[in-house]
Image (cartoon, rainbow, N blue to C red):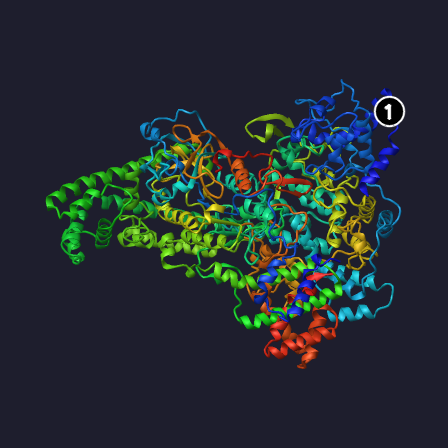
Amino acid sequence: MSTERLPLVSRRDLLRMTGAGFGMLGLAPLLAEQTPAASPLAPKPSHFAPKAKRIIHLFLNGAPSHVDSFDYKPKLAEYNGKPYPGGNLRTERKTGSLMQSPFEFKPRGESGIPISEIFPEVGSVIDHCCVINSMYTDVPFHEPSLFMFNCGQRLAGHPSMGAWLTYGLGTENQNLPGYVVLCPGYPVVGPQLWTSAYLPGAYQGAYVRNTERDPEKLVPFLKNPSTTPEQQKRQMALLEGLNEAHLERTGPAPELESQIHSMEVAYRMQVEAMDAFDLRRESEATRADYGEGDFAAGCLLARRLVERGVRVVQVYYGNSQPWDTHDDILRMRELAGDSDKPIGALIRDLHQRGLLDDTLVVIGGEFGRTPTVEVSGRIKVQAGRDHNSHGFTTIVAGGGIKPGLRYGATDDFGFKAEVDRVHVHDLHTTLLHLLGLDHKRLTYRHSGRDFRLTDVHGELVPGILA
Amino acid sequence: MLRLAVSFCFLLSALPLTAATALEYFETEVRPLLAEKCFGCHTQTKMGGLSMASRQDLLAGGASGPAIEPKAPERSLLIQVVKHEHERIQMPPGGKLEDEEIAKLVRWVDAGAVWPDSAAAAPKAGDKYEVTDEQRRYWAFQPVKAPTGDIDQLIDAKLVEKGLQKAGPADARTWLRRVSFDLIGLPPTPAEVDAFVADPSPAAREKVVDRLLASPRYGERWGRLWLDVARYSDERLNSTQDEPFPNAFRYRDWVIQAFNDDLPYDLFVKAHLAADQLEQQDLAGHTREELAPALGMYGLSPKFQDDRIDVTGRGFLAMTIACAQCHDHKFDPIPTEDYYALLGVFNSTKTSERPLADQAVVQEYESRRKAADEAKGKLNAYLAAQAHALVDAFAGRTSDYLMAARELLLEDGKGLAAAASREGLDPETLERWRDYLGGSPREHLLLDEWDALLARKASKEEFQAFADGFQTKLQEVIAERRRMEKENEIRLGGDDSAGKAARTELLSLPREEYFLWRDVASGEGHKLPVRASTGVLYYDGKAIERFLAGPVADYVTRSRAQVAELEAAVPEKYPFLHVISDVAEPKNGHVYIRGNADNLGDEVPRRFLTVLCNGEPKPFTQGSGRLELARAIADEKNPLTARVMANRIWAQHFGRGIVGTPSNFGQMGERPSNPELLDYLAARFVAGGWSVKALHREILLSDAYGREATDIAANHEIDPDNKLLWRYNRRRLDVEALRDAMLFVAGTLDSDAGGPPVMLDEESNHRRTVYGYVSRRRLDNVLGLFDFPNPNNTSERRVPTNTPMQGLFFLNSELAMAQAEALVQRAADEAGEAPAKRIERMYRLLFGREATAKELSLTQKFLAEEPNGWPLLAQSLLSSNEFLYVD
C-alpha cells in the first residue's frame, strides 16, 4: 500500500523522527501539506487557468430598482405619467403609467457611468466595476427567481452556485469553511438558497447569522465553554492515539483517515475562525470606512474571509426581502443609506490590498423593478414599482472583469433588456469561466443524470471580460 | 484488459456481412439496441445536437462532429464514446454497454453502417406518443422472475464469475454491533454482547434478529428510512415564516408503528394514497381509521401537485414521472399525458383535517371558537368606528391644536395642561400634536411650511393662516381616503385574497397625502419623534376608553367581558390528522403544452401509467381515482413496487442498493448490480405477504451480511466500490444513530415513544432523534451538519460527508460534553472508583469489548497528565472512529 493512501502513517513516522509528539498547533504547516485527497474540500485544479480565485456575492434581496440606482433612463422623466409603449409585459401585479425616478443621476468616475445620487460611494468606485444593465431572468416572482440566481434553476432542490464552486475547486484554507453565507435572519426561501442539494453535504454554505459581532456566537460550537486550550490539546492527542490504535486493527481505510483529518482541522479551526470572524481585530479607521449595521459588518467579514482563503462568501442584505419596494420607491434612500458605504468600502479595500485582481464581486438582486408604478395589491401608497424579470442590473467587479464598463442596455424606459442581453445562466457561465471552470464540464451525477449549475443553458459573455 | 476483451469479441463477430445480411443485422441487432439505449435522447430531443434517427443524421453528427465514419469504427465517435475511449464523452449515460453490444455496433459500422432509407426511427413531432415494445422490454418493466438459489448463492455466483475474493466472516461482537445499529439504531449493551458471544447454538443469530425486530426501537429506526422518502416535516412550507403543523407527528408515529407492526407493505402503500377509501378486500382486517394517518404523506406536503406526483413516482415506483410535465419523458416511456392523467387524480384531491375526536367535541370546539371570534370581531369593529368618529371630531379642531402647539414649541416647553385647558383641548392629544409637529424628517412635505414658520418664528397671524388651511386639507384627505376604501371594496367584490388584489387596479392617496393620513389619522402610527403605535388622532384599544361615556362605555365594558368569557370557554383544539380527501366533483386534467398552464391541450382521463398497463390504460372511475391508483401501484404484478422497496431495504442494510439509485429505476438510473438477486428479494417479499420483517430476517442471516469490513486490495481492479458485496461496507453512523447512541451509552436516553416533536437544540431533550422537530425553513444545526436530507424533497439516500464543522460538534457541543460527564458517572456507578475498572466499563459500554493494553496505557497516561480528565477522556471515546463507524 502506498503512503499516499495512508498519510497518517507517514505523518506519524515523521513525528517519530522529529520527536515532536502530538501537538496539533505546531504541526499545522506540516499537516497542510498532507491534506488527504479524501477531504472533500481539498483544493482542486480548475479546468483552465482562472482569472479569479474567489468570489463575494452581495445579494440585495427583494430586488432593488435598477432605474433608481444603476440604470439611468432620461426618457423616464420625459414620459412620466404616460403609458409604457412597449406592450403588456408580464409582471406580478397590475402596474400603471411610467414613473420617473425621484433621484438624480450623475456621471461618475473616469468612465462616466451615470449613478443615482443615493449610491455616492458605489459611484466613487465605479471605475473598478462593470455595470451589466441588460440582465434578465424568467419569471417576476421572488421564490423561483431567488432559486434561479442562486441555484441556476427555478425550482427548489438544486445546488447553489457556492456549492458548485466549492465542489469544483475545493477551498484554499482547510481551517475555515469553504463557503460562508452571512445574513441577518433569513432571506425568503431560506437555507435552500445555499444548499448543496444532491452534491455532498460538505459543499453546502456554512450559514452565519451575522446579527452578532462576537465570533463565539457566530459559528456553532466554535468555542468550548469549559475546556482550556491546554486541556484540549492533550485531549486531541489522546483521541489521535486512540484512533491510530483503531486504524492499526482495521487496516488501511481512507474513510477513517479522513475522519481523523477532519477532527484535526476542526481543532485548528477554533483558533482560525475565532480570528477570521472577529471584526474587533480591524482598525477603527477600517470599521469606520465600512460603516454601521449588519450589512456593513457582513461586507467587512467577507473581506476577512476571502483574505484567508475562503472560496465563496455570500452576504445577504437583510432578513426576508428588504428591497421589495412595492409601495414607495423613496424607501430606496434608506436601503441605499446603509448599503452604499459598505459596498464602496469593500471594493476599495479589496483593491488597496491587491485582492480585487483575483476576487470576483457580484452585486445585485434576483430581478429588477418596473419603470411603471404599481397600482394594485394591498399596498399603502402608489409610489412604488412591481417585480420585473425582463430587465435588471447586476454589478460585477474584480478578477477578469473589464472595469469601468456599462454593458448592455434595457429599452428607453428600463423595462426590458434589449442590447446584449445577459440571462442569469449566462452570468453563471461567465463567473464560472473566470474561476477557471467550464460550466458544461462541472457536472455531478445524481439519480442517473449529469446535473450542472446552468442546466442545459448558458453562454459566455465575452464582452465583460477584461 | 478491457480493451483486449472488446477486440476479442470484435474478432469473433467480424465475419463479413453481405448486403442482405447487413440489412437484417441492422434490424435484428442494431436498431433495437439503438432504440433502447440511444433514441431516448437522440431523436426528438437532440441532446448534444445529435439526432440518431437516420444514417444521414449520424453522418451529419452533432456538436462534437460526425457520429460515424462508415467502415472505420475506430475513427467513429459513436464507437469511441460507447467504448469509453473518448476523453470527454461516455455513452450511454445509464452505464456502459455490454461488450457484446459494443461489438455489434463496431461490426455494423465496419460493414458500412447499413440503414434502410425509408425507415424513420422515431415518431414525428405531433404524433401521439406510443410506448414501444422495445421500451416495454426494459429490465425494470419486466415481470419479476424468481431465480433459483438464495441470497448467498446469487451473490457468490457473481463473485466467482468476476474472480473476486470474499472477506471472511465478521466476529460475533462485530456482527452483533452491526445488526443492532442496523435494526434499532443503537449499540448492544455489554450484557447482550456477553450473552451472544457465549451462545454457541446455531440459532443464536436468529434469536438476536428476532429480539431486535420485536423491539419498539426497531420502528423508530426503520420508520425514519421511510420518512426520508416521504419528505416528512413538522411544519408547513412557508417562505417567510415558521409555521408549525402541531398534528404532523401523528403521521410520523403511524409510520413508526406500521414498521413495528410489520404492516404488509402493499397495504402500507395503499393506505398512503387512499386509506379513506379502502374496501374490505384491501383492508386485510385493518380499519380505515387505523390507516388514515398514512394520508399525511400527502396531507402534510406543500400544495404543489408536481411534488405529489414526484413523490408518488419516485417513492413507490422509482420512476421520475414529474419530468413529463413539460414534454414526453426524454429517457423513460412516460408520455406527457401520463403526467396529466395523474395530475387529474391529485387535482381531484384536496387537503383536509380529519378530527380524532367525537363529532360532539368537534362541534363544541367549532361553535365556541366561532362565537368568540365573532364577538371579538364585532367589538373591534365597534371600537374602530368609535376611533374614526373621534378622529373626525379632533380633525375638526386641528387649527386650535396647531395654534396651541405653536405656543408650546415657540414660547415654552411646559404649561401643556394649562394651554390645553385654556382652549378646551385634550392634553394627551395636544401633547401628541406637539411632538409630531416638532419632529423631523417626516415622510411627506405637507408640513414643511409649518417647519419654516417655526424656524423663523413667524407671526401668530401667519401661523393662524397656515393652521386654518391645514385643517381643511386634513379633513379632505381623511374623507378622500374613506371614499377610496369603499371604492376598493367594491372593486375587490368581497374577495380579500392577495391574488384578487394583485389583479385589480386599486385606488390610493397620492404619496404626500397618504403619509399625512397615515401619520395623523390611521391606526398605523409613525416614527416622530419616537415610534408611535397609532396616528396622532387615533386612539385604539384601552386608550380610547377614556373618551367613551354613558351607554357607549357601558356597551364596550360589557362586550369586553363577554369576549373574555367566550374566549375562556373555547376548549383546546381537538386533535386531528392532516389528510387528503376527494373534491366534490373530480375532474380530468388537460395537458399543459410545454408545462404552461395558459396553453391547454387535450383532456386526459385520470388513469395509471401507460407502460405499467397491459394495452390501453383504463380510465379511473371511482372519485378522484386514488383507490384505483393505489391498487395499481400495490398490485403484486406491478414489476416495480416490490423491487423498489426490496432495494431500499437492501440499501439500508448494506449501505448501497442493488440499484444504486433507489428512487430511479429508469433509463437514467443505475442498472442493478445483481438483477437475479433483486428479483429474488422482490419475489420473496411478495411471497412473504409483503412482510418487511421477514425480508430483514432473510437478509441479516445471510453470509454476505456477516462478512468482515476488511479491505482486500486484490479486488480493487475488478470491483473497487464493492458493488458485488465481497465485503461488508464500513459506515459512519447517521445523525440519528450518532446522537441516540451517545445518549444511550451515557445512560441518558429517554425511551418514551411518540408524541409531539421536541426541539433538538433543547438541552433537556434526551429523546430519540426521530422525535426531534424537523423544520422546512431552518433545519436543526446538528441535523444539517450530519447530512440529514432536505425535507422539501423526497430523498433516496443519505450522502455522508465528513467536514471539520462536524468535528467542532464533538469538541465543543454541550451535547457531547454533557454525555461525556454522564458516561463517566455511569461507569463509576457500575464499576467503582478504580481507574482501570472504569475505563474497562466505558470500553464495554461503547464498543462491547475490553480495552487493549495499549489503550489502557494511553488513557491512564492521559489521566496522569490531566487529573480531572475523566470527562475529557469520555468525550474522546465518544468522538473516536470506533464509536462513529460500524464495521
Q: Is residue B354 left or right of residue B108?
A: left
Picture coordinates of residue B27, whole percent (x, y): 82, 25
Which amino acid is tagged 1? Answer: Leu
Q: Residue at x 82, y 41 (%)?
A: B144
Q: Say if residue A123 shows up in the picture.
A: yes
The local crowd at label 1, few if under 14, some if 14 to 19, many if 20 or more residues have their Cα within 10 Å, is some
Mark 1 element type? loop
Query: What is the number of callouts on the image?
Result: 1
**Viewer-proximal residue among B196 and A314:** A314
Picture coordinates of residue A18, whole percent (x, y): 64, 69
Q: Residue at x 66, y 81 (%)?
A: B833
Picture coordinates of residue B345, whole percent (x, y): 64, 35
Quadrant containing the N terminus of chain A is bottom right
Q: Is residue B818 above or below residue B664?
A: below
**Viewer-proximal residue among A138 and B230:** A138
**Viewer-proximal residue among A6 and A203:** A6
**Viewer-proximal residue among B257 and B577:** B257
**Residue at image mark 1:** B17
Q: Say if residue B381 shows up in the picture.
A: no
Q: Residue at x 73, y 23 (%)?
A: B54
